[in-house]
């Protein structure tokens, strides 16, 4: 700064002061973001999910019905995963539900695409579902 703007000849902050202020600002921001997320997401879920119907398609895919219950205290959407029971596969079905009221149950019908090249075929009765 020029002498007119800095008559007391105060020096610039040290690198430690500068970096400390930045770290403190980032820390406070992360703390506030965490509190905001906790406030907005409280009462969402958990969701119970189960496969209630399945039918093999001619192309090797499956028509599946998934029943989802919102056990939370807020209306919310759920992200659901339908699998073959042997871990996550690249051709598993993931979908986002419509909003489900708190305490309500909804049924969603989806088409699971046929397994990819080299993928194991679907076996009726072995499909599972989970939502979060």
Image (cartoon, rainbow, N blue to C red):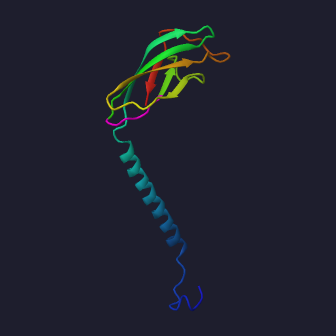
From which residue to which does the magenta span run?
73-79
Total marks in image: 0
Q: Nearer the viewer, residue 17 or 111?
A: 111
State yes or no: residue 106 in magenta.
no
Dominant SS type (magenta)? loop
- Tell me which residue sits at (60%, 22%) in the image: 91
- Quadrant where the C terminus sits is top left
- Tell me which residue sits at (38%, 51%) in the image: 35
Q: Nearer the viewer, residue 49 or 17?
A: 49
Q: Position of residue 37 (x, y in %)?
A: 41, 47
Q: Position of residue 25 (x, y in %)?
A: 47, 63
Q: Position of residue 26 (x, y in %)?
A: 48, 60
Q: Position of residue 55 (x, y in %)?
A: 52, 9
- Quadrant where the N terminus sits is bottom right
Residue reaching furthest to the right: 117
Q: Is residue 5 visible?
A: yes
State yes or no: residue 78 in magenta.
yes
């Amino acid at each position: 700064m020029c002498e007119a703007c800095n008559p007391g000849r105060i020096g610039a902050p040290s690198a430690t002061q500068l970096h400390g202020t930045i770290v403190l600002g980032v820390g406070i921001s992360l703390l506030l973001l965490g509190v905001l997320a906790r406030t907005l997401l409280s009462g969402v879920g958990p969701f119970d999910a189960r496969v209630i119907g399945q039918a093999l398609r001619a192309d090797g895919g499956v028509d599946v019905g998934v029943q989802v219950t919102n056990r939370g205290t807020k209306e919310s959407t759920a992200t659901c995963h339908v699998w073959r029971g042997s871990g996550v596969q690249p051709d598993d079905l993931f979908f986002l539900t419509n909003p489900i009221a708190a305490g309500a149950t909804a049924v969603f019908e989806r088409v699971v695409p046929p397994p990819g090249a080299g993928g194991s075929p679907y076996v009726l009765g072995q499909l599972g579902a989970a939502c979060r």
